[in-house]
Image: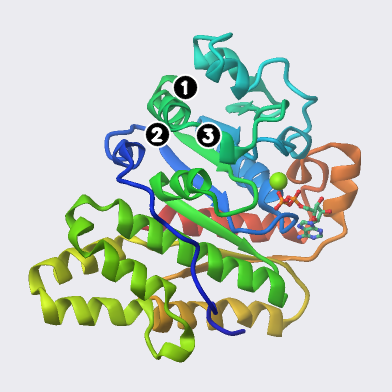
Amino acid sequence: MNPPMGKGSSMEAPFDVTVKLGAQRRCKIWAIGGGKGGVGKSLVTANLSICLALMGHKVVAIDLDLGGANLHTCLGVSIPDKTLSDFLNKKVSNPCDLMTRTAIQNLTLISGAQDDMGIANLKQMHKAKILSHLDDLGADFVLFDLGAGTTFNTLDFFIVADQGILITLPEPTSIENTYRFIKSVFHRKLKLAEELLEIGPLIDKAMNARISDNSTPADLVHRVIEINPQIGQKLQYEINKLTPKLILNQVRTQADVDIGHSMRIICRKYFGIELEYTGHLDYDATVWQSVKKRRPLLLEFPNSGLVHNFDRIVHKLLGAR
Ligand SMILES: Nc1ncnc2c1ncn2[C@@H]1O[C@H](COP(=O)(O)OP(=O)(O)O)[C@@H](O)[C@H]1O
Ligand SMILES: [Mg+2]
């Protein structure tokens, strides 16, 4: 389980206003991401949404895996008539008209695009439109199912969230992808901070350094503090705000469970950030059985061990900063 190797993705985008929209929202946003496809993001989004709704919160789950949307299946509803595309293309003006009821009281779904619109193609104004209308939905919690990849759009939806939740499998490819995702989030977040514009080139250099250069993103802060203590403090402030949560999925052994702790330690050492290990989900055959039946896991198998896993995780997330 090595820290991320090689060069980071190139990040030359200018300051992005959408990220600023994060501050004044009434609803809480939880974004579920993590770089790789097939690791359980939709399963987690669906079942965390159900947990919150069963606790009495009003929840809207939004499928932002544009181009590969299937959150509806995990929630046991057929493909909704109206999708985000209709809102972005102005066929639907009120975002509440996109909300599809589910079998769970308090939980509705907004489906992702069913056309060819990929998340990479989402325009800045579309992203801003989605974010600026979230409070119109009247929800206590809005959950984003982010889909795979590290495009700016995916990173930005992760960054604006109150809780950014990463799903990883206990296998090298998935772990590597998770580090890559964290690195991209870290880079993007620092590049979006207006106060840090003047050290942009230094940030790029630190993020693109190879392990063999003996330079890590965590070293960046020390270097900036030496050169310019005031900017160093701002940098440290931005980094302190970055506290992604980690869920290890499809766990089979204690050694699998322990991977989460190792990843936390590596993130602190390499990035200087606190990755919070929120918990693990056991590998459980009830998952594919419920997917096959197109029924939400928590409703179909209420006594499955996974229900306890989810319960613990949701309580931890509710108490997290
Ligand atoms: N805890 C688990 N136990 C067993 N199978 C799982 C588990 N989590 C996910 N899966 C399997 O992985 C598949 C992919 O999950 P999904 O949520 O669609 O991933 P993603 O949204 O990340 O692409 C599921 O259909 C299911 O078969
Ligand atoms: Mg998915």
Residue that mark 2 sits on: 27
Q: Nearer the viewer, residue 151 or 261?
A: 151
Checking the image for residue 3, the label placed there is none
Asked if disc 2 and disc 1 are in contact, CB closer than 8 Å, the reply is yes
Residue 296, x across and y down, in percent: 77, 40
Three-letter residue code for mark 3: Gly
- Who comes first in sequence, dot 3 or dot 2? 2
Q: CA distance from mark 3 to mark 2?
A: 14 Å
Q: Residues within 10 Å of mark 3 (few under 14, many from 20)?
A: few
Q: Is residue 210 left or right of residue 193?
A: right
**Residue that appears at 21% across and 65% down:** 199
Residue that mark 3 sits on: 56
Total marks placed: 3
Answer with the quarter of the image where residue 225 lies: bottom left
Three-letter residue code for mark 1: Leu
Q: Looking at the image, is 150 positioned above or below residue 270?
A: above
Q: Looking at the image, is 139 positioned above or below residue 238?
A: above
**Residue that appears at 79% across and 65% down:** 283
